[in-house]
């Protein structure tokens, strides 16, 4: 094969046995990589309703065909396992350098199963692999652990995927951190890693698979290098936080636990605010010229180490406006702590915002919060909560379980303040502004997610609309709050495309366009593929993820949203409307039907067979 190594490393931590499995071209073309490999393993090898933190769960680190090619955006990989927050399908996608390094070391994926008796780390280098003792690493933050691994192995260019104390303590939304600043943030993959006593995966590779047309890939890479400022210069200049002012202006900036959509200190935490105060550099992922990653430094009143990078938009939303903190230095410190401890910044901020609302509504008192004045805007309390959650100390023990479980324990109506879907906390996008995205939150296989979703703001004249025609959709631009049949037709195709991107190993911020993506897959693999086949890959994976959840007992009733989004937002803007329950349910049912699922959201045998998933129909008994 071209573009792939054709090798997957299987690691049984219980026995210490490791072996390399080889799969043929048909398997790779069917499941592709990234999300595809993750979902295949979860459906094929992980029993239904297994405890995500038990040895029976399996952790996969999966690359796509485009991971590691010499072109911008190719640094992404995917971490998969049953989700400790939801009990269903789980996946965290991440950029940086680790994925490309693993591809160059000779593997397309790693399957980790069982549980080690004592802490270990996995060392992979140029086709070789071994488990090493990690007793000295256990309890260390990610920076200290990475330095110790590189010193032990004698190579400062080793790439790492690791957990800090939050992962070791199995905080349900702990994440996997690559090279200190790139997070496989969602779905609690760090908790799964911690449950297996696996501290880190260290990788060094100097090879890699042959490419079908390296010349064309090089031409495309040079084209983007010459034109990236025109195509995506805003991302270079201000990063993902560049859109904060526009979100605030439209009422779409989640504030004080989604009670409002405007924040009086929005300018402080925006990309411009960061640029003018604490930004000292911009960094890139593997082979990428865009350099959208922030690097910040703070000396007073907090010390923030630039080695931990800097906050992205989701972080300034979750640990800024959502908790009412308008001090960008405090947000940067919280980001550093989350990267050091291996915490998902989205869930961490949303859980703290939940706790703050419970405190302000009298459901929690100082006796419950270890004396913390847990009010919106209290930056010191927010930072203290990050520490407590990571270490499961005091109030952190409860909040480490996530807002859904914490709300059940608190009771007295606390569930209304828990902003989650299926147990996973919402990202920083307001469903009362982007109502199609709200439908996407509800039907997402992982619980609320903003990446394998739509952003209704793309349905405006320009490139966002142009691609609809190649999908066979003839519609005019639609309002953000429209969730009628035309919007949901677009939604169905768009989430399948997004699912494909989680299989490819290509960053969504690089505006290659659909035709160039097809060309890049051809140039990498040599396959005579086309847009139709790639869209079917995305549909196949969305359907397979749905099947996993159906087997685990999820139904259409679980595809819901917090009540808050069916109510008027505080301080509404003209663009803000609550979701209408009937319109939202009709939109959900339209999506099920368009995907070939029953009204209960169960994939039919015909649809599964048409997607080459007949074996899944047998598993589901449909």
Image (tube, rainbow, N blue to C red):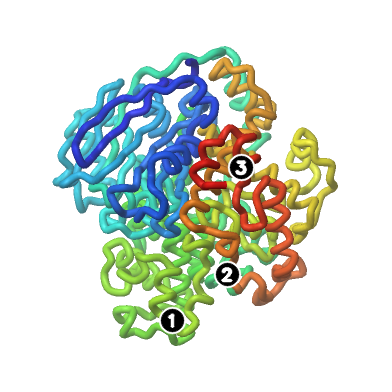
Q: Is residue 34 visible?
A: yes
Instruction: Please report the residue visible at 47 percent of the width from the left and 63 percent of the height from the top.
Output: 423
Single out the mark in the foreground, 2 or 3. 3
Residue at x 58%, y 43% (from the top left corner): 542
Q: Secondary structure at mark 2?
A: loop
Quick check: can you spot residue 288?
Answer: no
Residue at (49, 82) in percent of width and height:
413
At horizontal 79% and vertical 53% (from top left) the residue drawn is 485
Q: Give coordinates of residue 55: x percent, y percent.
A: 28, 48
Q: Residues within 10 Å of mark 1 (few under 14, many from 20)?
A: few
Q: Please, is residue 21 above or below residue 237 in the view?
A: above
For residue 470, side relative to residue 275 (left or right): right
Residue 562: mark: 2
Is 376 located above or below residue 15 in the figure?
below
**Taking 62 as reference, is 53 above or below it?**
below
* Residues marked 2 and 3 touching at CB (< 8 Å): no
Q: Nearer the viewer, residue 535 or 356?
A: 535
SS assignment at label 3: helix
Q: Name the spot of residue 122 as percent of width and height, x first.
A: 25, 35
Label of residue 605 in the image? 3
* Residue 326 position (above or below residue 455): below
User: How far from the left and from the top, in percent, is residue 532?
Assistant: 69, 29
Expressed as whole percent of the image width and height from the top left, the position of residue 305 reads: 34, 50
Labels 1 and 2: the sequence-earlier one: 1
Q: Which mark is residue 411?
A: 1
Q: Nearer the viewer, residue 360 or 334?
A: 360
Q: Disc 2 or 3, which lies upstream in sequence?
A: 2
Give the structural element (helix, strand or loop) at label 1.
loop
| Image marks 1 and 2: residues in contact by CB distance under 8 Å | no
């Amino acid at each position: 094969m071209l573009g792939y190594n054709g090798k997957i490393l299987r690691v049984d931590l219980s026995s210490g046995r490791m072996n390399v499995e080889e799969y043929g071209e048909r398997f790779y073309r069917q499941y592709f990589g990234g999300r595809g490999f993750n979902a295949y393993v979860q459906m094929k090898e992980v029993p239904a309703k297994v405890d995500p933190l038990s040895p029976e769960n399996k952790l996969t680190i999966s690359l796509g065909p485009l991971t590691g090619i010499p072109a911008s955006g190719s640094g992404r990989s995917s971490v998969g396992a049953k989700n400790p927050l939801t009990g269903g399908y789980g996946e965290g996608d991440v950029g940086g350098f680790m994925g490309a390094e693993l591809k160059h070391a000779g593997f397309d994926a790693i399957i980790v199963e069982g549980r080690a008796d004592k802490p270990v780390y996995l060392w992979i280098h140029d086709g070789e692999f071994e488990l090493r003792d990690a007793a000295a690493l256990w309890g260390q933050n990610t920076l200290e652990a990475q330095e110790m691994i590189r010193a032990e192995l004698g190579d400062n260019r080793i790439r790492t995927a690791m957990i800090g104390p939050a992962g070791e303590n199995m905080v349900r939304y702990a994440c996997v951190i690559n090279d200190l600043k790139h997070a496989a943030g969602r779905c609690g993959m760090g908790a799964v890693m911690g449950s297996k006593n696996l501290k880190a995966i260290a990788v060094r590779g100097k090879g890699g698979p042959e490419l079908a047309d390296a010349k064309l890939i090089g031409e495309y890479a040079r084209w983007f290098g010459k034109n990236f400022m025109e195509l995506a210069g805003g991302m270079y200049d201000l990063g993902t936080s560049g859109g904060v002012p526009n979100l605030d202006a439209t009422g779409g900036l989640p504030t004080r636990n989604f009670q409002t959509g405007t924040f009086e200190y929005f300018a402080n935490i925006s990309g411009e605010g960061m640029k003018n105060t604490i930004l000292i550099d911009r960094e890139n992922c593997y082979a990428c010229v865009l350099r959208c990653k922030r690097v910040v430094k703070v000396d007073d009143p907090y010390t923030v180490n630039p080695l931990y990078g800097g906050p992205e938009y989701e972080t300034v939303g979750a640990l800024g406006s959502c908790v009412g903190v308008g001090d960008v230095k405090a947000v940067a410190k919280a980001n550093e702590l989350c990267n050091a401890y291996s915490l998902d910044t989205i869930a961490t901020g949303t859980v703290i915002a939940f706790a703050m609302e419970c405190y302000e509504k009298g459901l929690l008192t100082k006796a419950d919060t270890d004396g913390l004045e847990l009010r919106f805007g209290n930056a010191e309390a927010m930072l203290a909560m990050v520490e407590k959650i990571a270490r499961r100390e005091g109030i952190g023990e409860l909040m480490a379980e996530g807002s859904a479980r914490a709300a059940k324990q608190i009771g007295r109506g606390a569930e209304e303040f828990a902003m989650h879907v299926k147990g996973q906390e919402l990202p920083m996008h307001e469903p009362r502004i982007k109502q199609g995205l709200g439908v996407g939150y509800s039907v997402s296989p992982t619980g609320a997610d903003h990446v394998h979703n739509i952003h209704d703001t793309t349905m405006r004249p320009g490139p966002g609309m142009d691609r609809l025609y190649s999908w066979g959709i003839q519609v005019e631009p639609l309002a953000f709050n429209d969730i009628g049949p035309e919007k949901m037709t677009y939604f169905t195709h768009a989430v399948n495309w997004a699912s494909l991107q989680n299989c490819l190993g290509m960053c969504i911020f690089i505006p290659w366009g659909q035709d160039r993506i097809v060309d890049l897959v051809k140039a990498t693999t040599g396959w005579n593929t086309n847009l139709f086949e790639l869209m079917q890959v995305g549909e196949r994976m969305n359907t397979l993820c749905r099947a996993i959840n159906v087997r685990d007992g999820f139904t259409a009733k679980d595809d819901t949203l917090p009540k808050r989004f069916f109510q008027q937002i505080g301080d509404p803007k003209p663009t803000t409307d609550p979701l209408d329950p009937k319109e939202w349910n009709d939109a959900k049912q339209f999506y099920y039907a368009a995907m070939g699922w029953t009204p209960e959201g169960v994939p039919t045998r015909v649809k599964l067979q048409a997607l080459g998933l007949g074996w899944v129909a047998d598993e589901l008994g449909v």
